[in-house]
Amino acid sequence: MKGPSGFNNSPVKQTTEREKRIARNKEFHPIAVKRGLAPKKPKAGDLSPKGRAELKAYEKFYSNKANIKKLKLAQAEYFANKK
């Protein structure tokens, strides 16, 4: 628990499954973009026509369950071969 001064008096912070999954996704995303498996993440607040088109393509890609499944399989294969 953190006190009023912000001091954390717990002995060791355990990483949760959610934190591990987020770390793996952050590590794999640039590799997926480089391999052409996923679209590049659009810039936040880019209201130009090109920025809107990138955002629409990004949302369309991640709304398709087949794309997500393909990405998860590629990520699992990447981490299996990494070890």
Image: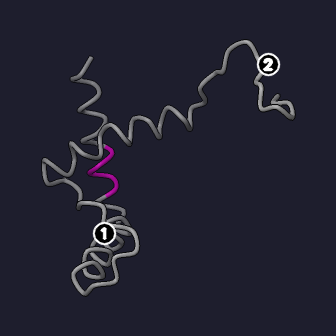
Asked whether 57 or 11 is in front, the reply is: 11
* Residue drawn at (23%, 22%) of the image: 82
Residue lying farthest top?
11
* Badge 1 amino acid: Tyr
Rendered image quadrant of residue 24: top left
Question: Measured from the top left, where is residue 43 in percent x and y?
Answer: 33, 67
* Residue drawn at (59%, 26%) of the image: 15
Residue lying farthest left?
35
Label 2 packing within 10 angstroms: few (<14), some (14-19), many (20+) = few
Residue lying farthest bottom?
49
- Residue 79 in magenta stretch: no
Q: Which residue is mark 2?
A: 9
Q: Nearer the viewer, mark 1 or mark 2?
A: 2
Badge 1 marks a residue whose secondary structure is: helix
Rendered image quadrant of residue 38: bottom left
Q: Which residue is mark 1?
A: 58
Question: Measured from the top left, where is residue 56 in percent x and y?
Answer: 31, 78
> First in sequence: mark 1 or mark 2?
2
Give the magenta range. Answer: 68-72
Question: Measured from the top left, where is residue 41 in percent x and y?
Answer: 30, 61
* Badge 2 amino acid: Asn
- Residue 69 in magenta stretch: yes
Badge 2 marks a residue whose secondary structure is: loop
* Residue drawn at (64%, 21%) of the image: 14
* Residue drawn at (27%, 24%) of the image: 80
Compared with residue 6, is residue 30 higher up or lower down, i.e. above or below? below
Query: Disc 1 and disc 2: Cα gap in Å?
Result: 42 Å
